[in-house]
Image (cartoon, rainbow, N blue to C red):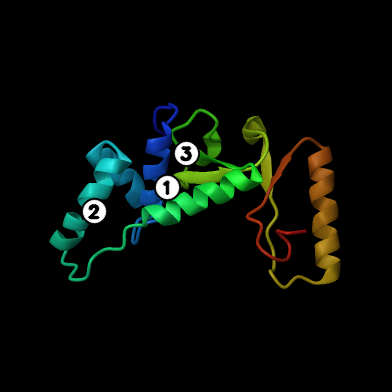
Amino acid sequence: MIQPRHLLSAAERFDWLRLIRSENVGPITFHRLLERFGSAGAALEALPDLAKRGGRTKPLRIAPKADIDRELRANDRIGARLLCSCEPDYPEPLAALDDAPPVVSILGHPHLLQRRAVALVGARNASMNGKKFAERLARELGEAGLLVVSGLARGIDTA
């Protein structure tokens, strides 16, 4: 879902992360909540009542502020930062997906996210030959000018 591009304040970014980390809030629900309530903060305030009106009897787990603080500090320690789907550096091809992640952590140079990209995926329990091949393929694709992206899972992604 493509949104107008703008930078978020630190408080807005905190609320975005808190909303997407809350129970039963995936990317599509996240964007629908933003459309309906105008901000992640307003959506967070509305969630308990929405859940109750939807028939939920137990309280909905909204991500605790302390958990979000911990995640942000961990990002800071390694030099990573959050990038939200409404921000100018967010990759346009990713933003065009209906279920694009509202928040991603990035480490490195965000301008690289605008390059053509390829993802290598494969087995988590990859063979040694598979890992060597994936590493060689990723290196050669990178040398050819493509951005090689990874979810950093074990196996092929790590290679």
Amino acid type shown at disc 1:
Leu
The answer to whether the residue labelled 1 contacts the one labelled 2, judged by CB atoms less than 8 Å apart, is no
Q: Is residue 9 left or right of residue 141?
A: left
The mark nearer the N terminus, 3 or 1, is 1
Name the foreground residue: 65 vs 111.
65
The mark nearer the N terminus, 2 or 3, is 2
Instruction: Name the residue: 26% across, 36% down.
Output: 38
Instruction: Name the residue: 32% across, 42% down.
Output: 40
Q: For numbered disc 1, what is the local secondary structure?
A: helix
Name the foreground residue: 159 vs 59.
59
Quadrant into which the N terminus falls: top left
Q: Nearer the observer, disc 3 or disc 1? A: 1
Instruction: Name the residue: 46% across, 38% down.
Output: 85
Per the image, the residue denoted by label 3 is 84
Instruction: Name the residue: 36% across, 57% down.
Output: 64
Residue extending farthest to the left is 53
Q: CA distance from mark 2 to mark 3?
A: 20 Å
Badge 3: residue crowd in 10 Å (few <14, some 14–19, many ≥20):
many
Q: Is residue 121 left or right of residue 135?
A: left
Amino acid type shown at disc 3:
Cys
Of the numbered discs in the image, which one, if any, rests on residue 17? 1
Q: CA distance from mark 1 to mark 2?
A: 15 Å
Q: Is residue 121 left or right of residue 4?
A: right
The mark nearer the N terminus, 1 or 2, is 1
Image spot of residue 11 (x, y percent):
38, 37
Q: For numbered disc 3, what is the local secondary structure?
A: strand
Per the image, the residue denoted by label 2 is 47
Q: CA distance from mark 3 to mark 1?
A: 9 Å
The answer to whether the residue labelled 3 contacts the one labelled 1, judged by CB atoms less than 8 Å apart, is no
Q: Is residue 114 left or right of residue 19?
A: right
Amino acid type shown at disc 2:
Leu
Q: Is residue 30 above or below residue 52?
A: above
